[in-house]
Image (cartoon, rainbow, N blue to C red):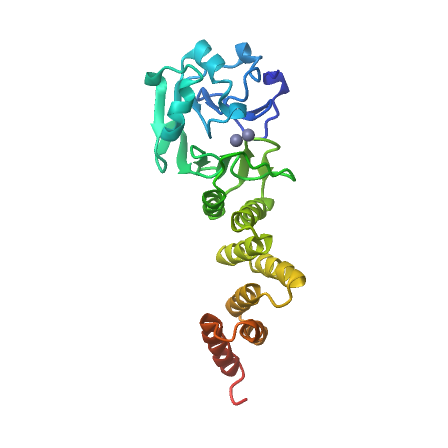
Amino acid sequence: MMSLAKVSTRLKGIHQLSGRGNCYLFEKEGLLLDTGAPGDLEGLEILPPVENVLLTHSHECHAGGLIKVCSAYSPRVFCSELAVEGLKNYGIPKDKIEPLKGNETLSFGKLRFRVIPCPGHTKDSMAFYETKRGLLFTGDSVFVGEERRIPQGADLGEWAESVRFLSTLKVSFVLPGHGEVQRGKSIPKMIVESYAFLQGEAEGDPLMGLIAGGIQYADLDMMPEALEMFDMVLDKEPENPGAAFSKGLTLLKMSRFKEAVDCFDLALKVVPDFKEAANAKALALAAVKGVNPGR
Ligand SMILES: [Zn+2]
Ligand SMILES: [Zn+2]
């Protein structure tokens, strides 16, 4: 049971309601983002009228309260076109459902959301990105905290790719489907760590996940974090050619040429015909000479 009295609010005009799943109520716009599980919205009578509902996905903890909201307010329900079939089980009339393909922009009053398809956790997972304040509503796509639950039927490879894309967005707040709202500097790390974990699961090798995470950090210009991830792999497997090569590329980007050469040498020692490593080593060597002319 929850009610507005239990709401914690950090963002003006948005209330977080936490039952088995989180819902977010935009008071002025009469918009409810996710509905929680059946029974989560017991204090609903005191909510302002809900005109629109946005759903991150069709799992019960997020869409199960829909029957109650719909019977009370008859709102329009925006969700992935892939969730529509499932919502029939909740008894939602089809003409109230607005199917989303992804990449649309939705407007509610002054609020604008970009719809980001996030297949993986479920086929019908979506994230909603409010660009003005950099708010990202992630549903269950990004892991917050220690618990990393993978539901049956999840597609790990797709999920990892969805999360990798989320890491490229400029985000000030992550508003997840479970757990606390996240803010500030910890966000890119949280998202890339989720990506690295999922990629490791997808490949059946956590070290591959860490390498992928490091590459993503480097793409995001988070060089110290990237090096840290490659080093985590090299601590476990000191001659991992993929980690050595990727670390070398990162050092090259940071103009740490001599260290880069050492990394490429390590990769080439293990895989002598590693062409990319040989090419990158040549670049690094040329740069070393450029930095120290005449030597
Ligand atoms: Zn879920
Ligand atoms: Zn959930």
Residue 218 against residue 57 in the figure, above or below: below
Q: Is residue 170 left or right of residue 2?
A: left
Q: Is residue 105 left or right of residue 24?
A: left
* Screen quadrant of the N terminus: top right
Q: Quadrant of the C terminus?
A: bottom right
Q: Kindly indicate the quadrant of the structure image that contains residue 21.
A: top right
Q: Nearer the viewer, residue 244 or 86?
A: 86
The vertical placement of 186 against 63, above or below, is below
Residue 54 location, quadrant:
top left
Residue 109 seen in the current view: no
Residue 234 seen: yes
Q: Position of residue 15 (x, y in %)?
A: 55, 24
Residue 206 % position (x, y): 59, 52
* Residue 75 vertical placement versus 123 (above, below): above
Foreground residue among 270 and 68: 270
Q: Residue furthest right?
A: 235
Which x, y percent locates residue 171?
Answer: 50, 42
